[in-house]
């Protein structure tokens, strides 16, 4: 009898296991929302990033956050992004811009794509359009510390050291153990204080 029960137990559990999984024909309200799940995971990771005990722990959390952002891009858009990055490395920002434009047509909600296009625009000398793209990335993900650092770099290059310091401080508020942050912040503070004199 116990042997028979051991054989039948998995079969008895199958309906319960099947009931726990959403059916393909189930109403949308009962299916998990991938965007909500992604947002909840990002919320958890950003809290962990602020509380990371050391730089190596922060780097691990940062890598997971960047991984989530990267997964927001479809395979087709990823191919365009890779080609765009090769074009940027090959000093062809005009061709990279075309690739990033095409990727954004496919994935307009991916903040990383706006940042990549901003880099191409900045390389082409169109800082105003680059700043608009960074703002769009921050609209989509206000905690995008990479976008804030990129904005700080653009402000610094434009001679707005005080604005660059504010943007960099906003990035540090999100990611206090960012690599090389102390040295970069000291440099921006020195420039901002020099400008204030």
Image: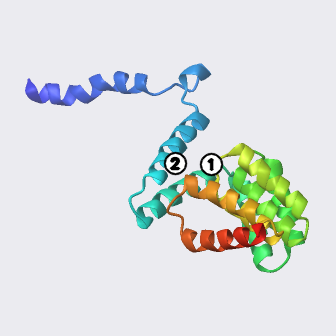
Q: In this view, does 65 lie above or below 190?
A: above
Q: Which mark is residue 24?
A: none
Residue at x 65%, y 49% (from the top left corner): 72
Q: Is residue 187 above or below residue 59?
A: below
**Could you say which is closer to the camera, residue 77 or residue 49?**
49
Residue at x 52%, y 38% (from the top left corner): 40
Do the numbered discs 1 and 2 sit on residues whose CB atoms are within 8 Å? yes
| Residue 115 x/y as whole percent | 75, 59
**Secondary structure beneath disc 2?**
helix
**Secondary structure beneath disc 1?**
loop
**Could you say which is closer to the camera, residue 8 or residue 69?**
69
In the rendered structure, the answer to whether residue 27 lies left or right of residue 9 reads: right
Q: In this view, does 142 lie above or below 16?
A: below
Q: Name the residue under label 2.
A: 46
In the rendered structure, the answer to whether residue 142 lies left or right of residue 48 reads: right
Q: How many labels does the image show?
A: 2
Mark 1 residue crowding within 10 angstroms, few (<14) / some (14–19) / many (20+) = some
Real-space Cα separation, disc 1 to disc 2, in angstroms: 8 Å
Give the mark, 1 or 2, whose residue is nearer the N terminus: 2
Residue 83 in sight in this render: no
| Residue 34 x/y as whole percent | 58, 36
Q: Which mark is residue 143?
A: 1
């Amino acid at each position: 009898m116990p042997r028979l029960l051991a054989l039948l137990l998995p079969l008895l559990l199958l309906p319960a296991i099947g009931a726990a999984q959403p059916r393909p024909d189930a109403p949308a309200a009962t299916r998990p929302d991938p965007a909500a799940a992604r947002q909840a995971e990002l919320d958890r990771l950003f809290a962990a990033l602020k509380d990371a005990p050391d730089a190596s722990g922060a780097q691990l959390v940062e890598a997971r956050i960047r991984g989530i952002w990267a997964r927001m891009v479809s395979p087709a858009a990823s191919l365009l992004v890779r080609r765009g990055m090769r074009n940027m490395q090959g000093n062809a920002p005009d061709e990279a811009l075309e690739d990033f434009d095409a990727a954004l047509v496919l994935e307009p909600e991916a903040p990383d794509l706006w940042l990549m296009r901003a880099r191409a625009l900045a390389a082409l000398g169109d800082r105003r359009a680059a700043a608009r793209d960074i703002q769009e990335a921050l609209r989509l993900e206000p905690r995008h510390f990479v976008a804030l650092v990129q904005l700080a770099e653009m402000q610094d290059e434009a001679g707005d050291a005080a604005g660059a310091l504010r943007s960099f401080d906003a990035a540090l508020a999100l990611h206090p153990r960012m690599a090389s942050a102390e040295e970069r912040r000291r440099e921006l503070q020195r420039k901002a204080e020099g400008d204030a004199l």
